Image (cartoon, rainbow, N blue to C red):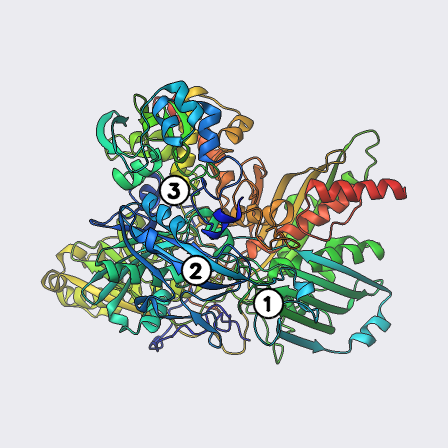
Amino acid sequence: MNGNDDGFYYLRGIPVPETPLPDQNPQPWQKTEVVGRPLPRVDAYERVSGNAIYPSDIVLPNMLYAAVLRCPHPHAIVGKIDTSAAERMPGVRAVITGSSPEADFSWPYSPEMKTKLFNPHCRFEGEEVAAVAADTIYQAWDAVRAVSVNYNILAFVSDEAKALATDAPSVHAGGNKLKIDRYSRGDVEQGFADADVVLEETYRSECELHTPTESHGCVARWDGDHLSIWQSTQGVYSIQATVAKIMDLPLSKVRVIGHYMGGGFGSKLGADKFTIIAAVLAKITARPVKLFMTREETLIAAGNRPPVSMRLKAGVKRDGTLTTLDFSAVGTGGAYPAGGTSLVDWLIRDLYLCPNVRTETTDVYVNAGPARAFRAPGHPQCSWALEQMLDALAERIGMDPLDLRLKNIPSYSQARPGNPPYVSTGLRECISEGAKVFGWYEARKKTAEPTAGSHIRRGVGMASALWIGGGGGPPSTIVVKLFSDGSVSLNMGASDIGTGTKTVMAMVVSEELGVKPDVIQIENADTGTTQYATPSGGSKTVPTESPAVRAAAIHVKQQLLALAAVDLKTDESSLTLIGDAVVSQADPERQIRIRDISGLKKRGLIIGVGYRGPNPEGKVINPFAAQFCEVEVNTLTGEVKVIRFLGAHDSGRVMDRLTFDNQVFGGITMGIGLGLTEARILDRNQTGKMVNRNWHDYKIPTAMDVPANIISLPIETDNREANTTGTKGLGEPVTIPTAGAIANAVYNAVGVRITGTPINPLQLCSALALLRKEE
Amino acid sequence: MSEDRDEKGCGGRGEECGRGMTRRNFLASLGVGAIAIAASGNPAAEKEASAAVIKSGEALEINLQINGHAHRLLVEPRWSLLHVLREELGFTGTKEGCERGECGACTVLIDNIPRYACMTLAVEAEGKEITTLEGLMHGEKLGAVQQAFVEHDALQCGYCTPGQIMAVEGLLRKKPDPSLDEIRTGVSGNLCRCGAYVNIFKAAKKAGQLKRGGVL
């Protein structure tokens, strides 16, 4: 595994075209004029005015609305389907099922495992059985409810531990064990022998759901044999590739557009079954079809962060040297191969210096909705276990938990073959600078003071992290156009998923060409009109795209200077671009305004093309982080209130301080959800159905649950070796250590360790009652 | 939930499969106007209201007052205000997040009070002053709350943002200088999965200042 994200299971199988290597990399920026400033988003106006048209906003002339009938059972064989009543209902234009010839497509859950689009063997509650297109969405749902289906209900299993029992119902022929991954280095037994303290604990991270505010869906329209799809997505090109392959169409006949999208967090990286269903319904009816999932459907059938049970045994010397980490985990990606334990041991392998490590992860099938990549796959789960263990070890050897971490900081990647060095690691600075700004030692002293009489206890905790990806890499192609008046257009394939991609890229153009970011017109996320890009995921968009944007802008500048040199009758190497004029460095009197350059006037515009070059050989590019928090625990009600948070993040150069800080706030907010409120609940004993399939019962953090006091502390390391903008990813590391830091703070406050997410009043009250009994 | 209903598939729109507050008991609990009750098919309420039974497929003519303009249109009695705004009238500043009164993406002002358009029937909204995100604009110029959201980057993906802005607008119309706690409460019915709450708090504070300074 190298620093690129290409090895990730969710990017596998996406065709990647060859791109030329850059001729020559530009020198790193020294002092920047625009990059690094807190700049409001270039598309903020559109987003706050309602002008931004999200895919779910689209209403096309003559458009139909579609709804999907989903299997209500966790495990069933679809028998006879009677659609006759539905077909006769007012407004209904098409009903399709598994026996409709037009819908006879296969769906690849993985390269090895394909099912039918409407799979007669439904392995999870929510698997697609039939679909309807009607004049209104109300009529479509009326018709869905009128379809009658005979299900042969099969025994199910929803608990991954029970799935491995010999008498467990089989999700797939061949048993429920999907795969076991093993890793080891050094000698774990020797590590335990060398340790002064050995601790063992089991942990559990519950299934978390993405729940982006815009649901998953698309609008599909055929113009003859050309298919256009407007989809809420993180990657238009990945959808294009999948749809073209499944429907056997040339790529040029599948246009996917996703200018805006309302959140994804990994659940919108690719095509969905609904994409094909909408296309089929649109084909049959010869009308555009809009198909968006209801909130309930997204909760059961649009992915999740896999639940995992973990065991960790660790050894440490009295001086804080970690001697050994022995980890095993059983997790599930649901009913189909979906990376149930993907990367769930990575932090054990790579975060802290440790010579002896052994991990074993077992991915099993259960009858539940398939997982999807969810913001830093595997990492928050692993962090939940590892960071609590570090805390416990520190306490046992009488060391501050922060000092224990500082004692074990690696400068190279231990888990990758050959131990390649990191281009930069700000882990030490994240921890020490973060502690300083947070006031860690003072706060720890304060929480150690006795609080007799009060039922409110305060605690502080911290956790650190790295993210396996975040270096970005090829391919990416960018086009920058300079108009004859000096204004600029930027053309890129990448989606802006709310992270501020468009704004950051406009700042890069502005830095190189001197135009103001708000006069740059941006065209993005459209396979018909913009350049190739991989999906915005893996915290790689800024390090992937920004060097290519810079290259394209420089390409424009070179051509501009060459044209100006003709008018100025001088050598172009002596020219420089200052504001709206090209000026001779030798003789500043000799200059010409961009709009006056005769060659540009004749041509009308200059086109610059930028490609993303390769990452440095033999080096690893990872972002690092440390987060600190203070909580207040009500020992009577078991409620945890997060008082304040600090996120210290090394993601290389800060491009836009506003969007950088916003990512930090958002990642922490999502981590508060994992730590305190969120868990998918399946009725595992009786029906196998999900019981909290709505936002009332599946609780994501609200404005009442987050502290107003969150500090973002960027740790800017030198990453000029990584790429020409010196950037690393940010979107995922910001949510990795949060839940673990909260658990440690809760322990610091009340002395009980909650090893299973979420730390809700139910769990905490029971644990506190137990503690009181013991006392 | 009956087995029969189960067999017809879940994932429906609240009324059939939803738990908690369904449209049916939402209506019953509020005891709204005669037409809406008739449409809900509650015989007791029907009798009480002595209105004609109108079936779901039949259209009613209503007048909606949206952003100061009158809209005369035909609606089915079961249509939500959200559906009418988005799919019938093309107001893209009112978003659909859950359609069951949980997320607030569809928040509009009805007589200056923030309300979920998904939990409001279009027929219910007749005769009231409806304000959507578009109604806060002054031509193509942003309103005070919108400006403050831009300045404080109080958004990420931007999909919950219209609802957040309407919630803050409603709060400020009632309480021009809200405390942090009042701001929290004011937007507590609006979920932001990207987690921009901290900036939303700052933007709400700033919007209050702008408005008190005369910016509308």
Looking at the picture, which amino acid does disc 2 mark? Glu
Looking at the picture, which amino acid does disc 3 mark? Glu
Residue A746 image position (x, y, % from top left): 73, 44
Q: CA separation, marks 2 and 3?
A: 23 Å
Residue A144 image position (x, y, % from top left): 38, 51
Looking at the picture, which amino acid does disc 1 mark? Tyr
Res. A679 in view? yes
Circle 1 crowding by C-alpha within 10 Å: few under 14, some 14–19, many from 20 = many
Tell which tag, 1 or 2, sits nearer the viewer.
Answer: 2
Q: Tag 1, which chain?
A: A
Circle 2 crowding by C-alpha within 10 Å: few under 14, some 14–19, many from 20 = many
Residue linked to disc 1: A365
Q: Secondary structure at mark 1?
A: loop
Residue linked to disc 2: A128
Residue A78 image position (x, y, % from top left): 47, 63
Residue linked to disc 3: B96
Asked whether, in this view, residue A141 is left or right of residue A571, the answer is: right
Q: Earlier in the sequence, mark 1 or mark 2?
A: 2
Q: Secondary structure at mark 3?
A: loop
**Quarter of the image holding residue B206?**
top left
